Amino acid sequence: FIGGSSLAAALFCELAAGKPEPLSPENPLILATGPLTGTRAPTSGRYAVAARSPLTGLWGEATSGGRFGPQLKFAGFDGLVLVGAADRPVYLWVSDGRVELRDAADLWGLGTYETMRRVKEETDRRASVACIGPAGENLVKLAAVINDSGRAAARTGLGAVMGAKKVKAIAAVGDAEVPVAREDFEAFARELWRKVASAASSQALRELGTMSYFEMGPEFGDIPAKYFTSLEFDYSSLSGLKLKEEFRVEATACYMCPIGCGRRVFLEGRAVDGPEYETAASLGALNMVGDLREVVLANHLCNDLGLDTISTGVVVAFLNYAAEKGFVGVAPAWGDGEKLRSTVESIAYRRGVGAVLAEGVREAARMLGVPESLAAHVKGLEIPMHDPRAFFSVALSYITSPRGACHLRADTYLADMGAFIDEDLGLGPGDPHSLAGKAELVARMQDLREVYNAAIVCLFSNMTSSELSKLLSLATGWELTPRSLVEVGSRSFTLKRLINNAFGAGRRDDQLPEIVLEPYTSGPIQGTSPREELERALAEYYEVRGWDPETGVPYEETVRSLALSGYAARLAVHLPRREAA
């Protein structure tokens, strides 16, 4: 399993006896690094958080950058597993091979920025702190784990799991070196560093941050506006170039990152963390808010309250859409930045309609009497800001991802547009508006991204399977090839599928809601939709994966070939057998 979220899935199967409820003490919360974390490998500053998701009820995982993962390694730990719950607020102090529980009563109720500041004062100013805000404390199902001033393990609501355990924060620092197996690891890591640093995509991210996508996304019709119903929006108002023109901006970087896509924005006499693309698109375009100052403030508020900005932007836009269509008795607030921020705050504190939105868009639709076809989610996870009508392969990736609609495994659009090429895996340019032959592409891209999240490295490094297999081989002493790397990814992906099968998910859940299948009536992708091709492509995908087309459960033969039979037995998943031809 290598490490990261893949190892976390294996640990979850061993620890989560009896299918624990997401907010119960028995649900293990796992923080995991990978063998590259804390090394000199480029973009190796990431860590994973995993548990059963309170938002989806299925497998939940999120990764984050910054410096927390490396500091956990330097403190002498590859990961932490939290089981049970404290009877009062606590935080964990992890240092030089020791873990200490400390009282956090005076931290409960604080935002993430003040929490991090105080914990560092009490422990070590060099420490990296991962914590929750009021959203996690209030068990909001969109709650994130925030570290290092705005870096977020945000998706699937794992901040609420941490809040249910009464763990406010985890601080880590250490001086240990991370060993590697081969002496030539350093030389190859430096070679990759230079390649990543000089890539055209890295230069764009360094210059304008992830909001640079606002410069090109509109050409493909790939930035949804007005709750996935329109492409009529001034996207230039939220671009990285606009941010640079309107504010003083500094680039920031995670540990061992040659790219530096992060942004620190100086606003009204203070420095705040600038929004990422997904944030600006969800809080901004999806809610028709074109005032960049309001989007910057809303992003900072979400970070401080400890909220997933993607899911938060989607549920607020859902409320505006439901209001516009007459499902709820409030006026829509499209374009109103102040109303956006007040709604964000109401979600974190579960006030008024915020208590409904705090449950996520799927449950909010049910509670408000809105047809579920209008709830923008897959398996309970809100749909991110890459449109399945712009790149049909994204549709197939969204519906099959282990955690629900996941942009980090749906980046097949990069291959379609020629921005990511992996000759060993057959990944390269294709027709964005066709699913013909895409099942294999989607599966292999997902497998590669599984290994990224096991290693763990950032997707923006754009390492090929050949480069990543060599890097991991030099670090660990294992003999990995692009082919064996895909097998590791497939093993991880299939195990997470089995976990979801154990929690009741299957073929019927692999679908997109109508709200993101209805073609746009204007714009660059007017009239396009993957609707007609999706069923056929899904059947082909099941064949590629070795999953039963009726149930969506992996075949017994598939599970056995991936050495997962013991895990399937532990999860009590009934495995179908492939019928002989």
Image (spheres, rainbow, N blue to C red):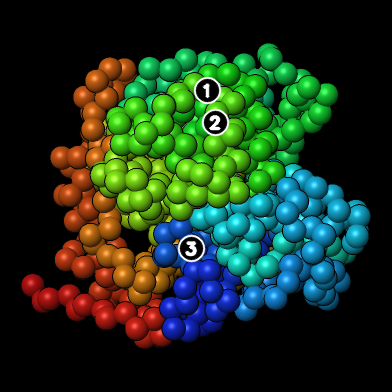
Residue 60 in view: yes
Q: Distance between the residues labelled 2 and 3?
A: 26 Å
- Judged from the image, the secondary structure of the residue bearing numbered disc 1 is loop
Give amino acid for label 2. Leu
Q: In this view, does 165 lie above or below 65?
A: below
Q: Distance between the residues labelled 3 and 1?
A: 31 Å
Give the farthest residue toward the left. 581
The quarter of the image holding the C terminus is: bottom left
- Residue holding disc 3: 53
Left or right of 51? Residue 564 is left
- Residue holding disc 1: 336
Dot 2, crowdedness within 10 Å: few (<14), some or many (≥20)?
many
The image quarter in which residue 286 lies = top left
| Labels 2 and 3: the sequence-earlier one | 3
**Residue toward you, 16 or 257:** 16
Give amino acid for label 1. Asp
| Labels 3 and 1: the sequence-earlier one | 3
Query: Could you tell me residue 314's position as x and y percent?
Result: 45, 39
Query: Could you tell me residue 322's position as x and y percent?
Result: 34, 35
**Residue toward you, 227 or 45:** 227
